[in-house]
Each structure stands twice: as C-alpha cells, then as structure tokens.
Image (cartoon, rainbow, N blue to C red):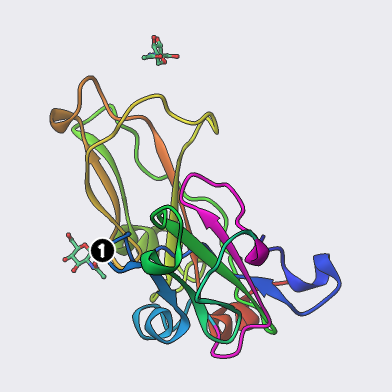
C-alpha cells in the first residue's frame, strides 16, 4: 500500500489501517465519519473502496457474515445481536481517489549507546532542514537493522508530533537502534517530492 502514484500508474491511494473501536457489548464499530474526525489528514471524505480484517490480519469479506455496515462511503459495523458468535476486533482501511505521500526517507540521528535512542522531530528538523514536513501526519519506527526486533520496547514518546524516544533504563537491556520515517500532508509533498 501507499505506493506513489507514478509507480502504481493511477491516482488512488490506500490508507493505513484504522482500528478506533474495540469489541464491546454492542459490537465493533469502525465508521467513516468518526475516523474522518479523528484522523482528518490521513483519509479522504469519499473513499472508493474499503477493506476489513481482524486485528490479527485475517481478511474479512462482506459475504462472510451478517455485518450491519460494510461500505466505503460509510465504514464498517459489526453488531453482536446480528452475529452467531460475538464480533471480533476489526480494522479497516480505505482506498482514496487521491494520494498522500511518504516522500521523506528514513532518519536515524541517534544511537542507543548513551541513555537511549532519541529520534525527535524537533531535532530532525534542525539536522535535516527541508527534508521533513513540520507537521507530519504519521510516523513509522523500525530497527535500523531492518530486522523486526524481538524485544518489547518501552518508549517515552512515539507520535508524529514529537517523534520517538526509547530510554535504556526503561528496558530490559538496551534499546535497539531505531530509524523513523514520517508521512506528510500532500501539499507539503507535492512541493518537495519527485513522485
Ligand atoms: C533476540 O535477539 C538477540 C540478538 O539477535 C538474541 O541474542 C536473543 O536470544 C533473542 N531473544 C529472543 C527471546 O529470541
Ligand atoms: C506526543 O507526545 C508528546 C510527549 O509525550 C505529547 O506532549 C504530545 O501531546 C503528544 N501528541 C499527540 C498528538 O499525542
């Protein structure tokens, strides 16, 4: 997902997965209007497709069950009262007739040999001026090695407005060396990126 438009040959873009509700007595509700309110820059108002999966990653087709709502323009709703078994915890993603961008590369300015590994946005903006937008809408964090870590890390900060920070004294062992990547608003990208 998330390939730049020129690489996919079209102008559609798949959003990230959203999981804003947990199964309750009522069910699991992942409706578009609420997702739009919570994540206005990460999704478009008029998606053209929706995909639904369990949070574990199993795709769920509209025909599989008696779902109340399964519609790109409305979202998804599973209501326990209509199910044989209780609703699971679902995530949804949409295809938008527009593109977002993730045109910044991975950044890694700190190493975990001091107190921990800091990859803070304010520092990155100073060190790499013009290469990251000041107002990212999403952040990805991965070990520099590219190998998924087998450690559970306890982070101090992990959000797109502040960045990422892992402190050794909070860990069993030391933090991995992490790299971060930001997703920026389309307006910023189109002025900066070569798609
Ligand atoms: C995690 O990876 C490290 C380094 O590769 C290894 O030494 C350690 O045994 C692994 N721990 C687990 C629980 O797999
Ligand atoms: C990001 O984390 C910082 C530091 O913990 C916090 O002050 C800020 O409110 C957080 N922002 C969001 C959008 O959660």
Q: Nearer the viewer, residue 72 or 67?
A: 67
Direction from residue 80 to residue 97 in the image, left or right: right
Q: Nearer the viewer, residue 64 or 192?
A: 64
Q: What residue appears at the point 40 percent right and 55 percent down from the top-left corner?
A: 89
Q: Tell me where the magenta segment starts and ends, as one range.
A: 44-63
Direction from residue 195 to residue 36 in the image, left or right: left
Direction from residue 28 to residue 186 in the image, left or right: right
Q: Quadrant of ligand 2?
A: bottom left
Measured from the top left, where is residue 37 in percent x and y?
36, 86
Magenta: main secondary structure equals loop
Looking at the rendered image, the quarter that the N terminus falls into is: bottom right
| 57 magenta-colored | yes
**Relative vertical location of residue 171 with respect to residue 135 in this rendering, above or below:** above
Direction from residue 86 to residue 15 in the image, left or right: right
Q: Nearer the viewer, residue 70 or 107?
A: 70
Please identify the residue farthest to the left as the structure is shown: 169
Q: Is residue 28 among what the camera can see?
A: no
Label 1 Cα crowd, 10 Å radius (few <14 / some 14-19 / many 20+): few
Within the image, what quadrant is residue 5 found in? bottom right
Would you say the beta carbon of the disc 1 residue lies within 8 angstroms of ligand 2?
Answer: no
The residue pinned by badge 1 equals: 25
Q: What residue appears at the point 62 percent right and 53 percent down from the top-left corner?
A: 59
Measured from the top left, where is residue 65 in percent x and y?
57, 62
Looking at the rendered image, the quarter that the C terminus falls into is: bottom right
**Relative vertical location of residue 92 with respect to residue 166 in this rendering, above or below:** below
| 117 magenta-colored | no
Measured from the top left, where is residue 133 in percent x and y?
46, 73
Q: What residue appears at the point 40 percent right and 58 percent down from the top-left corner?
A: 127
Q: Nearer the viewer, residue 144 or 37?
A: 37
């Amino acid at each position: 997902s998330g390939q730049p438009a020129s690489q996919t040959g079209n102008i559609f873009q798949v959003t990230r997965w959203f999981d804003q509700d947990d199964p309750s007595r009522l069910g699991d509700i992942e409706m578009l209007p609420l997702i739009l309110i919570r994540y206005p820059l990460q999704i478009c108002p008029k998606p053209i497709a929706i995909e639904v999966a369990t949070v574990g990653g199993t795709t769920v087709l509209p025909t599989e069950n008696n779902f109340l709502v399964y519609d790109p323009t409305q979202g998804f709703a599973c209501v326990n009262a209509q199910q044989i078994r209780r609703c699971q915890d679902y995530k949804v993603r949409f295809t938008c007739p527009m593109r977002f961008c993730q045109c910044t590369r991975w950044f890694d300015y700190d190493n975990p040999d001091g107190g921990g590994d800091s990859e803070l946005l304010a520092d990155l903006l100073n060190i790499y001026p013009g290469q990251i937008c000041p107002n990212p809408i999403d952040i990805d964090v991965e070990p520099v090695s590219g190998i998924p870590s087998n450690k559970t890390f306890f982070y101090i900060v992990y959000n797109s407005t502040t960045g990422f920070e892992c402190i050794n004294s909070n860990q069993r062992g030391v933090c991995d060396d992490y790299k971060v990547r930001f997703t920026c608003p389309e307006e910023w990208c189109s002025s900066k990126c070569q798609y």
